[in-house]
Image (spheres, coloured by chain):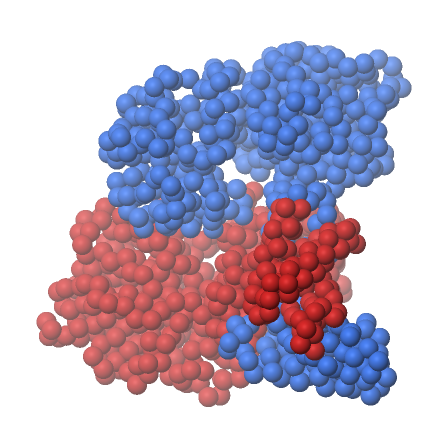
Chain colours: A red, B blue
Amino acid sequence: MSRKEKVKVIPLGGVNEIGKNMTVIETKNEIVIVDCGLAFPDEEMYGVDIVIPDVSYLIKNKDKVKGVVLTHGHEDHIGALPYFLKQLNVPVYSTRLTIGIIETKLKEHGILSSSTLKVVSPRDIISFDEISVEFIRNNHSIPDSCSLAIHTPAGIIIHTGDFKVDYTPINGDVMDLGRFAELSKKGILLLLADSTNVERPGSTVSEKAVGDTFMRMFSEATGRVIVATFASNVHRIQQIIDAAYKYRRKVAISGRSIENIVEVARTLGYLNGPEDIFVSIDDIEKYPKNKIVIITTGSQGEPMSALSRMSNSEHRKVEIIEGDLIIISASPIPGNEKLISKVINQLFKKGANVIYESISHIHVSGHAFQEELKLIHSITKPKFFMPVHGEYRHLKQHSNLAQKMGMNKSNVFILDLGQTLELTRDSARINGNVAAGQVLVDGLGVGDVGNIVLRDRKHLSQDGILTVVVTIDRTTGKVIAGPDIISRGFVYVRESEHLMDEAKIIVRNCLETCLENQIREWSALKSNIRDELRDYLYQKTKRKPMILPIIMEV
Amino acid sequence: MSRKEKVKVIPLGGVNEIGKNMTVIETKNEIVIVDCGLAFPDEEMYGVDIVIPDVSYLIKNKDKVKGVVLTHGHEDHIGALPYFLKQLNVPVYSTRLTIGIIETKLKEHGILSSSTLKVVSPRDIISFDEISVEFIRNNHSIPDSCSLAIHTPAGIIIHTGDFKVDYTPINGDVMDLGRFAELSKKGILLLLADSTNVERPGSTVSEKAVGDTFMRMFSEATGRVIVATFASNVHRIQQIIDAAYKYRRKVAISGRSIENIVEVARTLGYLNGPEDIFVSIDDIEKYPKNKIVIITTGSQGEPMSALSRMSNSEHRKVEIIEGDLIIISASPIPGNEKLISKVINQLFKKGANVIYESISHIHVSGHAFQEELKLIHSITKPKFFMPVHGEYRHLKQHSNLAQKMGMNKSNVFILDLGQTLELTRDSARINGNVAAGQVLVDGLGVGDVGNIVLRDRKHLSQDGILTVVVTIDRTTGKVIAGPDIISRGFVYVRESEHLMDEAKIIVRNCLETCLENQIREWSALKSNIRDELRDYLYQKTKRKPMILPIIMEV
């Protein structure tokens, strides 16, 4: 370890945003990537399916890239992996359940057989030439989650990944705080830590608390119990199975993503319970109502999810009836409140009893609150600190927290996407930046939806479109067919015939004036039509539809 | 008061929804309307400005309508009034500040001079022939808010309006609980009560608590203080002025809605403070930073609001700098979280310190929590109960609360919009329903945006549009110009030339096949083009743009 050896840390995702976590660790000859997640589109990204990181920097330096290490199996940490591996096929390292989940995903993308997936266990160390990565068990809302100690020529970098500290976790495996302490004795160069819940004082509640609530609710339930939760929350699912077992109920699973995860988790031994506790959703009618639990998706109100379909009587197998107890075991992710509320309203209207977070404690967070963050800072005593996993407000509050614990402000680095933190054994500074950003995925298109398309979609969504078509004579410039006007999303046409007739007259007059003034270029004709129509329509309706003039010549 | 006299209560808004509150009280010969509010469009109502109640039932029965009584001056209780008065010009009754706010509104709509507005005071009774309405002071997040006691031939109906119980309100006027108790002795036939916060246990915190926080924050602030809050929260604004006065700061107001309200409130004496404490936003640079407070709008992250513009360096007069203390004195209304977060991030990036609800107590709710609701149920002891102001989940929880307090389930009525609750002195039943629903306002259009337009806007927002134009010969049916294809919001055209060329070939082939098969009807041609293009594009892109074939004949 020389004083001159450098290591670069470059966030390609997960800072100044929620999701799409991806961090580059780069030494002289090597790059190792931590996580490769997706983000969900924000409300301005009309029609976009998912958002993935711009990895052009990695493609440019593909010879240096040694592999991807994944902290855990959530979409915001693994969801971009298929897209990345299609461009750069490097080995992927993670814990067993994480790899299991990825296998399903790569299979869907048709690249499983060509990919190299390597299972590691906590405390395992993956050694490349210059960098080695040690997996350290932590707690989170999915099993097999790890923090990472990244050993580099310049020193040790700890990346917490997503984590909480759960002293009574479902599987008994408390976060390996001892290993953090050991590493701390050697000196930690840089800490990267989860900032998701930095605004919340105190500590998270143990996952076990939710199990106690389930037990109480199951003991009182007289009809079916339907629990919606995050598909990947295997511990939560385990606790539902435990409660079902205790109260002699069979368990049916409904929803594609949760069926996938349950299958993987059962195969790999992450879900326990007697084999015959599971029944097919097709068979639930064979049992009395009070002998059934359905575990399902849709805790965020997603319109196509199983719970949402149940609430709309569109579920193939489950019709909600009076006496059903429905537990939505999740917190609303900001932005989803209205969708969830819609589902809750519908379920209540069908006569079910619905339990949700604002009226009961049926969810705990998987992300450390302030006191847990302080614990990690205090154990690791890093020389430098980079808050990650959060919008700027979270990173800023995390920086404040670190400073309150005695860290010098100049040792805290809030980076933007693509910014490079360059570290030596005793220094750190922001030094340049690399290409980074958002790549939008829409259907099969990766990156073909950009600002212009989004701007048009937004415009169309607000005021619709008005297409004006006219055929003119090539030689005389005279109108020989049209103008025809067709609108969509603007006004209800049958009630607006007069408006459309007036609009046609305006176009016709506009074309005549152009002809008189020898204006024959299409672009000029079109822009004249557009301007006159826009003014007329705005005056009449105070709306600004997109106007698309089309001129044909014969 | 005969046992046979009937009164009908019909919610035209405010049940099974948030906002657009409006309730009809109808006797044999009279109709009195309680509130006339708007709702904000939900995320599926693309491009819609506001939502108002369908009042066709009132128009149909216009001879019976005696007037509108308004509980307070919030948009969700008065915002539809201009639209209603344009259709049915009846007298409007409310307290002084409420009328003051309405005057501004009616002026903007050009109907102030033709409207009849009557100011009433708490304990005043407005007597019509069969119905009389008594105003009872309550507490809320706007001054001059009232509950109503509606005296009818069948008995007394209490409508709480929006309320909380504040024992230390800013203006000293505690809710007139005594009057509720007196009326209760006479017997309350029906209670309609605010369900907004029925899911929240305990009691609201007094508005005064926020003032204490302001004082503490102002005492520590070394630069400018900028407070964003709801424009109509005059008590909150008073407390900011009080803190400014104590710490010798001048107060500037920025934002159209808050400037309007402050002007009305100052004119009517609802805001106190030395005349010279107010300075124009144009003059703030004349004072040291630590002598300035700016009160502004944008606490919900509204993109065009003053705070949002400040955060983007687009505000005419205020550039955010390091040292500014920005207090967002509001809770996020569900659905606005992301917008607010964006503003907070931007403000932090500019170096300001930002205080917001999740990290400090700088807001209290204006709507009763469970214990306050229990107080009202307990004081009024109504025979029948109708929860209002809430989605179904809230109405349902409020029904549960009433039942826990001993009310018989059969005496609680959760109504849908337009349903009629028919009461006599000793009975109540749901009996029929009237026309009711949502009328969408978009620009100048009131009601002309319906399901088809919204469906099209949604479709356009997701995948854009592809217009296909072709000119064919009237006699031969042969293509003589085109096909031309123009797309918007679908793909980035420059990168998709090949796709568009292929699409043109498909259209051309499709038209030729039609011609060969003697298919000449436009509708058939169009639907063939649409089907073939849709299949082709979906196969290539997994997207489904709107396809608009246009055929011209010459």
If the image is split into quadrants, where does the C terminus of chain A sit? bottom right
Q: Whole-percent x and y of residue A22? A: 37, 69
Q: Whole-percent x and y of residue A122? A: 34, 72
* Residue A150, quarter of picture: bottom left
Q: How many marks?
A: 0
Taking B348 as reference, is B75 above or below it? above
As rendered, which of B77 and B50 lies closer to the eye? B50
The residue positioned 60% from the left and 21% from the top of the image is B99
The residue positioned 54% from the left and 74% from the top of the image is B493
The single residue placed furthest to the right in the displayed view is B4
Confirm whether residue B482 shows in the render: yes
* Residue B515, quarter of picture: bottom right
Q: Whole-percent x and y of residue A299? A: 58, 56
Taking A465 as reference, is B404 above or below it? above
The single residue placed furthest to the left in the displayed view is A3
Confirm whether residue A120 shows in the render: no
Image check: A298 left or right of B282? right
As rendered, which of B383 and B543 lies closer to the eye? B543
As rendered, which of A337 and A277 lies closer to the eye? A337
Q: Whole-percent x and y of residue A133? A: 28, 75
The residue positioned 84% from the left and 32% from the top of the image is B60
The residue positioned 55% from the left and 30% from the top of the image is B367
Taking B120 as reference, is B396 above or below it? below
If the image is split into quadrants, where does the N terminus of chain A sit? bottom left
Taking B321 as reference, is A28 above or below it? below
